[in-house]
Image (cartoon, rainbow, N blue to C red):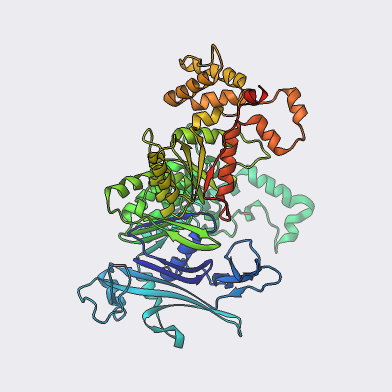
Amino acid sequence: MTRLLITDFRGWKSLDLRPRDHAVVAGVPRAGRSDVIEALARVLDPEAAHGPSLSDLHQTAPVEGDGEDQTSQFEAGSEAASPESAAPVRASTAEVEVTLSDLDPEIEQLVDGYLQPLDATGMASEDDEADPSAPQCVRLTYRLSYDHETEALESVVYYPARSNPETNHLLRVPAAVRRALPVITLNAGVPLQLRAGGSLRRYIEERDPKAAVAAFEVLRDAVGEAVTALSQDPAITEAVDAVLAVGGTGKRLGDSPITAGDVGFLAEDGSVSALLRTLRAALRLDTAGPLALTTHGSTVTAVLSMAEAMLLADVPGAVVLADDFGDQLDAATAEYLASLIRNRSGQAWLSTRRPEVARAFEPGEVVRLVRHGGQRTYHQLPQVRDRKQLVAHRQLHTQLLPALTAPVVAVTEGPHDVAVLGMANRRYPPHRLPLSAYGVRLVAAGTGSDGGIDQVPQIADLAKQLGFRVIGVVDADKPSQQSADQLDKVKKSCDVVIQLPEKTAIERAITAGVRLAQLAAASSVLTVFGQPDPLGVEATEQTVTNLCVTLHKKGLHEPFLDALYRELQPEPADAEEHHGKELEEDVSVVHPPLLAAILDAIATAASSSYSGPTMVALESVGRPDEDAA
């Protein structure tokens, strides 16, 4: 598939996607991952297509707001409801068009007369003077229409090359053509089922139908013999005769008196199918012996289920469609199976919430869906044109994939910043919302020791290309032309920039606004890591500076901050005194104040409706000891 064109299908008002080879579709919730896979299945896979419904037609409704005309989008499956004063407006027609290239000779014969030249952009060329030696392609379109008068839905798949929807002249695609297309939809179900309809049963019958019939006949005969032997066992016959003897029951039931010899046993209706429905897979995975599949946990079930689906989908060169791939799999298995599908298929289209699945694909194959102002759109990384882009793309797998489904990333200067802010974020009390509640993921610029403000624009640009809202969190170096130029580049790459106070890095942010006595008590933890205690002899502003240098050089931010939090916790008497006070007072008791200010600034800037300044310079925080003096 070189092009996917969607118009008014479900939550998609419009989508024009031109994948480069494979496509892993990910993104924020309600951005339309499942709708993309379903749209493809409606066109290409007649066996997987679901029946059309009214909710498949895109729906909008006017919303009151500041006297201006606005539009709110209603999507299939969403809980949103239109305002009582506004009736939803539903599209009367939805269309999904795909362009297929690299067709097998047999497929080309089936669609002869509808072939078109393929241009360099992946589109079918409408030019009569197109290069005759250009690759050939065919377009197929799924059309769903609703007749308001008859309240009837009608769906059809047609060739747009020689059709005219405006006059309702549609040349339909025969079902035989769609069945001939090498398109596989992976639908994972309960694995290792021998009953009719199970994936394992289907594979057994496809592989060798005669052997399958013979195997099930052997089962029927063996079960029949075993049941007969069971029915004739004295322990059974004597008990049955005792039941029939009660009040002469055996004499009244039949035309002649019946005994245990007239009583047999069957599985449900006695058929092999009924027997197979009762069978469940049992696995021996360890010394516990064979246990029912469900006993082994959800991961084993999910792995076997996906293995069955992939076995049935083993068609060379096929287009493979799968929705929510990897949801029930562990990280390593999800990446492995995604890699297997990508390498074996002609083209893989997997939608996923799992970063491990996306890790099996190239950066340019990631299609990230987002929502901007209630409207869906997609983002892809551009083709690599120079070394700078190549270096930036490397950070997709190392830095951005964990944030794949988050709408916002906060890019810091390095891993120490992420570690400190992450710990502070985790220590927020229950009545305060963490950054994840605002859809924010903390990300470090660079891939290790090469971080710094110069690296922030690189990963920020990458994140913007993938549709993230980007917040930069940077230090405030000593004012100079160089620092001004660096900050200017960060501003251009980010939606909002949060700058620490002047001459403040993350180490100074930990200690700012904290009493010297508390810093001195926490500083003693450094001796556990073989480092001298900078505040062991005397706690002054100079020794605090020495402490910050030690934290930076030795990377001991987390143990020091952990010890500091223990010192910041109020004593029982203080806790009672502060009970019931305002939220701001509670936070000042348990958090280094500048770290709390950074987290609050990130949370505020994360909102898409944020209208504050794009450059937020945080103010310095005085030390309580100095204020008291």
Q: Is residue 586 left or right of residue 358?
A: right
Residue shown at 49% from the left, 36% from the top: 418
Residue shown at 54% from the left, 21% from the top: 541
Image coordinates of residue 507 in percent, x first then y, are 50, 29
Residue 208 visible in rendering: no
Image coordinates of residue 409 in percent, x first then y, are 49, 46
The one of 58 and 1 positioned closer to us in this rendering: 58
Residue that extends furthest to the bottom in the rendered view of this protein: 167
Quarter of the image where the N terminus is located: bottom left
Choose top left, top right, bottom left or bottom right for residue 434. top right
The one of 230 and 558 positioned closer to us in this rendering: 558
Residue that extends furthest to the left in the rendered view of this protein: 133
Choose top left, top right, bottom left or bottom right for residue 167. bottom left
Q: Is residue 387 left or right of residue 11?
A: left
Residue shown at 64% from the left, 45% from the top: 236
Quarter of the image where the C terminus is located: top right
The one of 43 and 516 positioned closer to us in this rendering: 516
Count of marks, rendered view: 0
Image coordinates of residue 189 in percent, x first then y, are 50, 54
Residue 520 visible in rendering: yes
Image coordinates of residue 56 in percent, x first then y, are 54, 70
